[in-house]
Image (cartoon, helix red, strand yellow):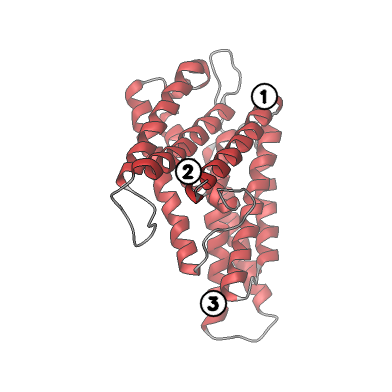
Amino acid sequence: MSKTVKTFLSRLLSTVVLWAIVVVAFVLGSHALFFALIAAIALLGLFEYFHLLKQATGSRRFMLPTLLVSMCYLAYLFQYRDGASPATLGAADGLAIAALIIILIITRLGSALEGRKSLNEILLALFGFTYVILLFSFAAKILCLPLVNEAGESTSAWYVLFFVVVTKLTDTGAYCVGSLIGRHKCIPHISPGKTWEGLGGGLLFAFIGAFACRYWFPDHLAALGSTSLLLLVTLSLSIVSIIGDLAESILKRTLEIKDSGQVMPGIGGVLDLIDSLLFTAPVLYLYLILIG
């Protein structure tokens, strides 16, 4: 069995297991369970980010205060899991960033300065919080939006499921089509494996998934009922999903690390799993605000 086939099978198995977890949580869960799952993934992703820094720079300074602020921030959002205004949710972001900057500076006062390294460590901690926690928190914020169907039932979890389906099918389509027929490299200086054929496959899979969701759950995705709007939202999410994948490639190539971890065979670490979701969650959140 070739290495490509083994990687594909490992990735397929990991994907099936992950989707099984999502489906079980969706069928059995409430907003609280979904929120807890999102928060746990975000915190694991942040921990993994600092582990990457440790591998690349030998230091993961400020990991504990950044994790502490992240937990407090997510706990603050948790109280609004059954409905909140965008203004209320947005105010939490600024407060969290301000608190983290203050805490990092206070923590840094306890030891001697080390030139630019001192500033770099603070900036890397802030970037980790922004990149992992703030971006992924938009998945939780979608849960907090007061979205309901005609029967008055909350449908916000269905929009989370929608953007996860579109995002992951973009990844899956790009990988499958690119592995099978990919010939023309699109951004070799960042991700040598990305091909134009793969990107086309990702877009195709995304549209299939989006229309399947609307066909099966029309009452739960009423805000995306217009075909033109569904096309626009899906295209936006798919393109941004690809950019999110490339963003993590920039991070890993900068740090000279192949995978962010080995939690999931064929996929890698937590950051490898959510890299595209980090970018698509804010986009769908913005659309829902503009639509609603």
Is 143 placed above or below 246 here? Answer: above
Label 2 vs 3, first from the N-terminus: 3
Residues 82 and 178: in front is 178
Q: Is residue 215 left or right of residue 58?
A: left
Mark linked to residue 64 = none
Residue 191: x percent and y percent? 39, 57
- Crowding near the residue tagged with mark 3, few <14, some 14–19, many ≥20 C-alpha atoms within 10 Å: few
Q: Nearer the viewer, residue 137 or 209?
A: 209
Instruction: Tell me the kind of residue under disc 1.
Output: Val
Q: Quadrant of the C terminus?
A: top left
User: Which residue is drawn at the image coordinates 58% and 12% (left, top)?
Assistant: 151
Q: Using the rendered view, name the quadrant where residue 149 is placed.
A: top right
Marks 2 and 3 in Cβ contact (< 8 Å): no
Label 2 neighbour load within 10 Å: few <14, some 14-19, many 20+: many
Report the amino acid beneath label 3. Leu
Is 111 situated above or below 192?
below
In front: 185, or 75? Answer: 185
- How packed mark 1 is, by other alpha carbons closer than 10 Å (few <14, some 14-19, many 20 or more), is few
Judged from this view, the residue extending furthest toward the front is 1
- Mark 1 or mark 3, whichever is nearer to me: 1
Secondary structure at badge 3 equals helix
* Residue 79 appears in view: no
| Circle on res. 119 | 3
Residue 282: image tag: 2
Is label 2 in a helix, a strand or a loop?
Answer: helix
Q: Amino acid at mark 2?
A: Pro
Label 1 or label 2, whichever comes before in sequence order? 1
